Amino acid sequence: MFEQIVLEVFLFFAIFSFLCCLQYRPAPQETPKPIEQQIKEAFALMDETAITPADAPVVESQPPTVETNPDIQDHSSAPTRQKSTGRATKKVGKSTSTAHLAAIEGIDLDRLPLRPARKVCQAVGLPQKVSGKNLPVATLRRNIQARLQEEPGLVQVVAEVLSA
């Protein structure tokens, strides 16, 4: 009895599979083109979509310029008093802002792009990553400004890095 049921199920699947194969009619395949013709078509397509020098957009990429003004006196020679801190000495003098220090050397820190900001951070010893993640450019700019306020003598180093 059990063998008869197994035989009926097996025959059902065999006949069903055979009929499915008879019903399947594949779509006619397109004959492949010769490789030479395919290459010619590809080059023709590339020539159609290629940008000519006249059509190309003009992109001028210039590094930030550093200008010095001889009329402005260097305030780093102004009398300062030493204030002791735990990690390094900090010069405290007249109110020196980062904007003023940067203006001496012609550096605009608010518009400093990412790569130059990374170069400056490396030169002045600031971290570029925290917990394995890159810091955003705005954070790098703030860190540079804070470091320049702490140590005004680093403005010259920043100017040298940006001019290179």
Image (spheres, rainbow, N blue to C red):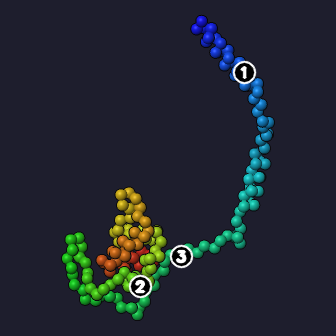
Q: What's under tag 2, amino acid-wise?
A: Ala
Question: Circle 1 — which element?
Answer: helix
Task: Judge depth for marks 3 and 2 and give the one in front.
Answer: 2
Q: Earlier in the sequence, mark 2 or mark 1?
A: 1
Q: Quadrant of residue 120?
A: bottom left
Question: Circle 2 — which element?
Answer: helix
Residue in the foreground of this view, choosing between 142 and 157: 142
Q: Position of residue 19 (x, y in %)?
A: 74, 22
Residue designated by label 3? 62
Q: Residue at x 30, y 77 (%)?
A: 150
Q: What's under tag 1, amino acid-wise?
A: Phe
Residue designated by label 1? 18
Residue designated by label 2? 103
> Image check: 53 left or right of 77?
right
Tag count in the figure? Answer: 3
Mark on residue 76?
none
- Distance, label 1 to label 3, CA atoms, is 72 Å
- Distance, label 2 to label 1, CA atoms, is 86 Å
